[in-house]
Image: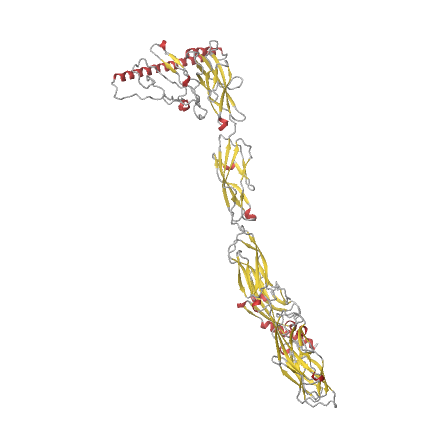
Amino acid sequence: MRAAGRTWGRWARALLCCVLLSAWEAAWGQLRYSVPEELPKGSFVGDVAKDLGLQMAVMRLIDRGRTQYFSLHGKTGHLVTAERIDREQLCRLLEKCMLRCEMIVEGEMQVYDIEVEITDINDNAPSFRETEMQLRVSEMTALGSRFPLRDAQDPDSGPNSLQSYELSGDEHFSLVVQADHGSDRRPELVLAKALDREEAAFHELVLRARDGGEPPLTGTARIRVVVLDANDNAPVFSAAEYTVRVPEDVSVGSTLVVVTATDRDEGINGHVKYSFHKISDKASELFHLDEDTGEISLKKEIDFEEISIHELEIQAHDGGELSDTTKVVITVTDVNDNTPELTVTSQLREISEDSPPGTVVALLHVQDGDSGANGQVRCSLDAGVPFRLQSSRGSYYSVVTTKELDREDVSEYNVTVRTADGGSPPLWSSTVLTLRVLDVNDNAPVFSEASYSARLAENNAAGALVLTVRARDADWGQNARVRYRLGEGRVRDVPLSSYVSVQAETGALYALRSFDYEEVREVGLWVVAEDGGSPALSSNVSVRIVIVDENDNAPQVLYPAPAPVSGAGVRGWSGVELAARSAEPGSLVAKVVAVDADAGQNAWLSYELAKATEPGLFRVGLHSGEVRTARFPLARDAARQSLVVLVKDHGRPALSATATLTVVLAENVADMLSEMGSAAAAVPGEPAGSLTRWLVLAVAAVSCLFLAFLLLLLALRLRRWRRSQLPPAAGEVLRGVPATHFVGIDGVRAFLRSYSHEMSLTTDSRKSQLRLSPASCCDTLPVHPQPDEPAPLLGEDPAGSRSHDADNAPVSASPPTCSHRPSIPAASAPLPSSYPCLPAA
């Protein structure tokens, strides 16, 4: 119990020394502690968190794959022992036993060195390798002769190690302790009194070794001295010390060195044998000594990194037990047999692509168990990666970025770090660092096309799909999620969103209403694509929707004007035209004018005669709508002809309209009015007063036109007479003027020089005549080109010379008749129902 109390007292004092001697060298990032050996597991070593001034930091010890003698409490920051530590086992040959470990603070990429000195306690007593020793000494040995003894071993260090020897048991011998170079103490027996074999053949001695601990511990060995007869020559080694250098990769069984000793005696006294006189436990496992030849060979592989120098003492003794000793120093040279070790101390698994250059992504530690050039390690990275190695401290390296990363270019890096030592050939090792690049919203959506266009047929169903726009975002995750929306805009002063919509997820564009080509022919809009980043990035693209016409409008007849609705509720078209009974085949009678609100082929119109009183008397121009005589009218032909003209477009299916014309076969207007009056009277329900009123108005209009014509003719004759009285100018030639392009009704130029009636009047009305010239009529789209020469003016002959006989000059007039082209604007004023021709004078 007293010894246990003393042991615990030593531990308490050692712990107090540990606390008092702990220091932190901030400049080098090191912590130093001191603890005694043999502490129980979990014993306190030091408060790392307090000594470093760290609060709420995550710390851990770096595992190097070796035995961990300490552990770190993550919550308290205390460094404690992880197992019982035996100093003699760890640092047998070292004066100072230092255990090192490394600690890293997560998030700071900072490594701290921790050194713990293991102080010795007196837990080992001195011991002899052989507790029973025997010496054979000749009785002739001179006084003062010395006999080396095997020394005791004490694994402790300092004061706790071996301090002294004591000899007891016989007065013939005394003890001398020789201090070897170093700290070793070698005991030697000294012959103090002459020996006499006949008096005593044996001498029993006790050798006691004592250390300096409190209390001191001792070890004993018994020595038996056998007194022999005289042997006057001892063996002598050829060298006082043998030195040999061997590489650590020398093969097992190889001979390292041969020691040689000679003895001048003969017989058994001259026969020399060899043995180890002083050798460590480790050396005894490695080396073998041949007792007959003195050859030292290798029993096991040697390791420079474990022990680089081995010191042995060899004793040579003859048959008479005389001996000599020599020292053998075996120096192990380093061989490049250790591959560099590369350890990833700390590493980032993910990094944002907008991290600045110089960001530390990994902390590496390299080491090589070899020495010299074989232990010098070089590190390198793969070429072409945006990283570089930066020496951190000691054998640590940091892997840092050299530029900003781009996830869209490379989303993950597998960086290979290689290490190679300076040996020949060099040894190398490598490790792969995997780093995933996190996305940042740095790319706006990009549409697959620069612009989009689509064709949509009018009268579409509401909700019809028009087209789909596509945009892709080079980012990842939420940053690459694209949503679509319409840009601001209006169509016919109506918000664009009431016409079309876009599906936010798919980019599908739908028509919200039915389009009418006659109202809207084209819709231009912008579609905006926006990603889901924060802040969001967007881009837009123009979309052009062309409305395609469909044949949804029937032709509209402009002339003849519409007739009133009949009692059956059917609205038709009607008109009254005059045709002379003397008209030649091909004479223009009337023209049906129609338009179509559609476009293109749907607006191309064709005309055909659907119904006629006399089917062979009239024909209708297919494209012009002109009604002409097909033959000479006959006396048997009815005076009142009813024609139904069918107007059709070229759509699919075709739409049509009808126009009803009434053609009166009469020589003059009076006959036509008379015929119309009789026809009107035959119609039941038509009041007679209304018909009479219309006839009076027609006669008045014709009379006014005739009077105006006579006044114009008189003015022209007076003007021509006055010019004939003036002398003609020299070289004067009356230039020909082209035929007058008669101005159409309400300025519609489609009527210019289309139709003309030619009249020749004389002072005698009985010689006047009216002639309808077929050449004066043409289709809306003329088949034959117009003549280059203009028609002659009034009183001008075809050669261009002016007639001097004004009285005999024919008068030509070309009153406009009904004509119209299909391209007439819909906004034009309606045409009159008929244009009566002038009667003969």
Whether residue 371 appears in this view of the structure is yes
The image quarter in which residue 506 lies? top right
Looking at the image, how many numbered discs can be counted on the residues?
0
Q: In this view, does 438 lie above or below 175?
A: above
On screen, residue 808 versus residue 19, left or right, reads: left
Which corner quadrant holds the C terminus? top left
Q: Residue furthest front?
A: 266
Of 827 and 592, nearer the camera is: 592
Q: Is residue 562 above or below residue 197?
A: above
Of 537 and 55, nearer the camera is: 537
Q: How was this image coloured?
A: secondary structure
Whether residue 58 appears in this view of the structure is no
Which corner quadrant holds the N terminus? bottom right
On screen, residue 558 versus residue 204, left or right, reads: left
Q: Where is residue 590 in the image (x, y as percent from the top left)?
A: 45, 18
The image quarter in which residue 313 lies? bottom right
Q: Where is residue 127 in the image (x, y as percent from the top left)?
A: 69, 78
Q: In this view, does 680 lie above or below 501?
A: above
Q: Where is residue 539 in the image (x, y as percent from the top left)?
A: 50, 44
On screen, residue 326 versus residue 696, left or right, reads: right
Q: Where is residue 673 in the image (x, y as percent from the top left)?
A: 43, 12
On screen, residue 449 versus residue 118, left or right, reads: left
Of 67 and 572, nearer the camera is: 67
